[in-house]
Amino acid sequence: MMKRKHEKSKQKATPSCNLESRANKNKKNDDSAATIWLFLWCFNNIAVTLFSRVEFRHPYLMASSGMFISSIGSFFIVGVAESYERVKRSLSSDSLTEDVESFALYMKDTREKKISPIVGLQSNIGKVITKLLGDIKRKPLDKTTNKIQILIISLLFSLQIIVEKISLEHVSMNFNQVMLSLVPVATMAVEILLGKTISLPRVLAIFSVIIGVAFACYGDMYYETTGLIYEVLSIFLIAARTIVAGEMLSGSISIHPVDLLSRIAPLAFMQLLTFSALTGEMAFAISRSTTSFWDLCLAIAGGILQFSLNIEYLQASKLTSPLTLCIAGNVKQVLLVGLATFIFSTPLTAMNATGIFTALFGSVAYSYFSAAEK
């Protein structure tokens, strides 16, 4: 009798145990995906920074070309993903499994259903992209507040690019890097104002990262008062952009990163293009007789890098907290200092080396405390 009761209670507990184990598995998958996207964003960010060292006389046109290519790329991804979803409804369930043979069966099904080669190609690309980025569906935004949020994020993207480029005319690159290390402090301040709590161990880890970056980037610390004001403004723009984007991606709206990019990139493109025209940069670029094919190639290459960086940034924003993303940005700066030592033969002082190790130690400590608090 007791044995039967034990078996019944075991059977009743099984569904809840399965749900719990499934939730834990999904959580681990999300953590793994977040780590991958953070690494991709970090190293792509380094590539964009190194690429910016190539001389290009029209920074706002370069930034607008990045948003233009991001617009085209995100619309293309959403389009092929929707094409795959439409084709998927008419195919057999066997061809939609995740095993190795499924792709061949998928191709066979598309031929048997007499799907046109173009639609078939679109759906095949969409199948691959969906595996990489998840289900991409264009979400209807009916509320006026949601549309205003989209406009605000696009303005934050544009203004941060504009303000940072203006600030670089009044401060040294080293001073700019040290100031950018303070982005986690600005993010932390905004999050506390919004009612979020941050534990003391995480706060100490954050400050060790900031001190490490300051030491690692220490060098020619030239700045003007105007540049300092622009730098502080840029820091808070980055913090606000990260928090607002994170809320759109994982909050009540929970929009897909590619869908969000397809909405903000066209707006940011028009804003940056307008600013380029107002500053006279566009007129100067058009009037130049020396504008070469090389300049065009630089703009396209920079735009493609910026597009991939935007995808990785938004994917990481969806899967991590704004503060974690800012810490990853600081780690990127430290890695960039170490990389510059080998590529550009930049001298590395004892203070710089100490800063690199301090920042890396702080980032590891932050990751440890964040994982322990979950």
Image: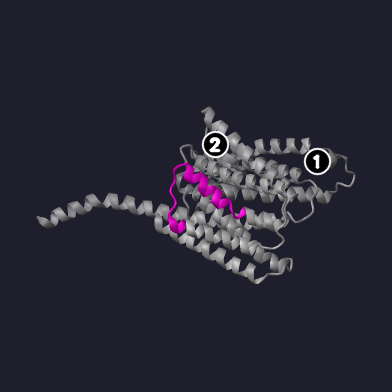
| Residue 133 can be seen in this image | no
Give how far apart the Cα atoms at labels 1 and 2 are.
Answer: 35 Å
Asked whether residue 194 is drawn in magenta, I would say yes
Label total for image:
2
Label 2 residue SS: loop
Q: Residue furthest front?
A: 225
| Residue 170 can be seen in this image | yes
Name the residue at 24% across, 51% down.
13
Q: Of the residues under marks 1 and 2, which one precedes in the sequence?
A: 2
Q: Is the magenta stretch mostly helix, strand or loop?
A: helix
User: Mark 2 belongs to which amino acid?
Assistant: Arg
Label 1 residue SS: helix
Q: Nearer the viewer, residue 125 or 310?
A: 310
Left or right side of 37 for 373: left
Q: Which residue, given by chain and number where applicable, does mark 1 sit on?
A: 281
Q: Nearer the viewer, residue 198 or 31?
A: 198
Picture quadrant of residue 63: top right
Q: Which residue lies furthest to the bottom in this view?
A: 350
Q: Which residue, given by chain and number where applicable, does mark 2 sit on?
A: 138
Picture quadrant of residue 331: bottom right
Work out which quarter of the rendered image holds the C terminus and state it.
Answer: bottom left
Give the percent coordinates (x, y) of residue 234: 64, 46
Specify start and end residues of the magenta stretch as a single range: 180-202
Rendered position, 99 above or below 237: below
Nearer the camera: disc 1 or disc 2: 1
